Image (tube, coloured by chain):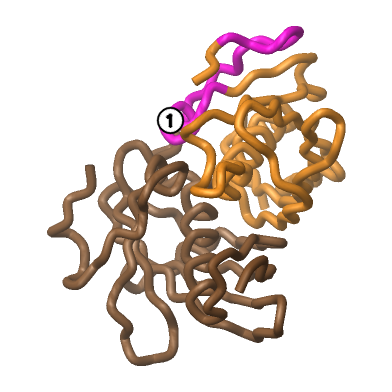
Chain colours: A brown, B orange
Amino acid sequence: MADMDALPPGAQNISRGGFNLYAGPFWRLPDEGDGARPYALLVEPKHMNSSGSLHGGVLMTFADIAMSQASRAVSGASRCTTVSLTCDFTGPGKLGDVIVARVRVTRQTRTMVFLAAELTCGERTLGVATGLWKILEQ
Amino acid sequence: MTSIPPAGFTRTELVDPFEIHVGPVFEQGNKGARRFAFVIDERHINMRGVIHGGMLMTFADAALGQAAWDACDHANCVTMTMQMQFLAPAKLGDLVEVTPVLTRRTRALMFFRGDFTVRGETIFSVASVWKILGQD
């Protein structure tokens, strides 16, 4: 179970159930005033691969959850769905890392949201992701 | 959780803790041409009752990773990039299947693609590049 003391102050749990909770928990962090929406994940033993690094599936799940939350927040929609997602793996995550995803909205139309996310641990960039979300219900 | 393999499949031996956490994964066929599958259960869905994108991407990384292992004889290899399209939702109890295709292999890189199907319909499509560590 996540040790909340490792997370930045003000972290709010956004994992209510299903895969989001089973793969998480994931956290929303207070805004840093730079226009990006920040989220956090504490890397636990269950998140690892056999080489002792963070599993790529966890990083992509985190990117998907952070960008989904951000697309709902900026559009005010009750339902959004991922249409496409690209993730580049730029460095390995380690056990105990607090990974922060900072999400920016590139463009928003009536029915679509374009987003980009950078996933970092301190000075290390672990991944960069871009994605396209469809607004299903306002 | 469904731990009994679907007809014609056997259980894949998983080694990554996160894959064991979300598995089991099943397979059929021979090395280099294996087909992989999993059954969507309560752990894999979102609050709308359809599969979470994160689980599909994790299964993709697992299945393409197994295929990458086949292609490089269990050398150390890592995912460099994954591009994914979510074409249609899949539901609780659905069997998701994929036969990863090695598009090209160089000394250091492996290019894969995979179309993931439920009852023959493609629901999710992936292209990815893998790096064989220690090769230039």
* Residue B134 visible: no
Which of the 4 image quarters holds residue A22? top left
What residue sits right under mark 1 in the picture? Answer: B21
Q: Position of residue A48 (x, y in %)?
A: 40, 40
> Which chain is home to disc 1?
B
> Quadrant of residue B99 in the image?
top right
Q: Residue shown at 46%/26% (left/top)?
A: B20
What is the span of residues highlighted in magenta in the rendered image? B4-24
Q: Nearer the viewer, residue A88 or B50?
A: B50
Residue B83 location, x and y as percent? Answer: 71, 57
Residue B103 in the figure: left or right of residue B24: right
Residue B58 in the image: x percent, y percent? Answer: 57, 42
Q: Residue at x 47, y 48 (%)?
A: A58
The amino acid marked with disc number 1 is His
User: In the picture shown, does residue B55 fall above or below A66?
Assistant: above
**Is A74 left or right of A88, judged from the image as shown?**
left
Q: Secondary structure at mark 1?
A: helix
Q: Main secondary structure of the magenta part?
A: loop
Residue furthest out toward the left: A5
Residue ID at (65%, 36%): B91
Above or below for B4 versus B65 = above
- From this viewpoint, which residue is outermost toward the front? A138
Q: Is residue A107 visible?
A: yes
